[in-house]
Image (cartoon, rainbow, N blue to C red):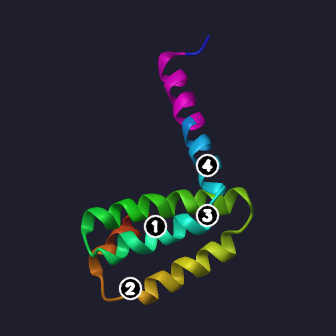
Amino acid sequence: MLTDKARRQGARELGRQRRLDNLARDEVDARARVAAMIATRKPTEYDAAVKLLTDLQALAKRYDRTHEYAKRIAALRQEHALKPSLLDSLNHAAL
């Protein structure tokens, strides 16, 4: 019999997989949303962008495209090298 904790964890994982399924339908739009969030230059938007980037990373792993994802993150870091708050958020998320 599953414990409440195990049920909650399973429900969270199921929700995450559904979110990733939805995200997979339009990754291009998701990347555009990330760019728009970063363009605001607001730390709260940086955090939202990093959350979305984390989901995009999970999709890259799911579909064996981690090399492509790593190149995108490297380009993003280079493009925004003068935004220490964004870089800190990326570092904290291990992106």
From this view, report whether residue 54 is shown above or below residue 17.
below
The local secondary structure at tag 1 comes to helix
- Tags 1 and 4 touching, CB below 8 Å: no
Q: Distance between the residues labelled 2 and 1?
A: 16 Å
Is residue 81 covered in magenta? no
Q: Mark 1 points at which residue?
A: 33
Q: How far apart are marks 1 and 4 (CA)?
A: 15 Å
Residue numbers of the magenta segment? 3-14
| Mark sitting earlier along the chain (2/3) | 3
Q: Name the residue under label 2.
A: 80
From this view, report whether residue 53 is shown above or below residue 18.
below
Question: Which residue is found at the position 49% from the left and 64% from the top?
Answer: 53
The local secondary structure at tag 2 comes to loop
Point out which mark residue 22 bears. 4
- Tags 4 and 2 touching, CB below 8 Å: no
Placement of the N terminus among the 4 image quadrants: top right
Q: How far apart are marks 2 and 3 (CA)?
A: 21 Å
Q: How far apart are marks 4 and 2 (CA)?
A: 28 Å
Residue 28 position by quadrant: bottom right
x and y percentages locating residue 13 in the rendered image: 57, 37
Q: Mark 3 points at which residue?
A: 27
Q: Distance between the residues labelled 1 and 3?
A: 10 Å
| Mark sitting earlier along the chain (1/4) | 4
Question: Which residue is found at the position 43% from the left and 88% from the top?
Answer: 79
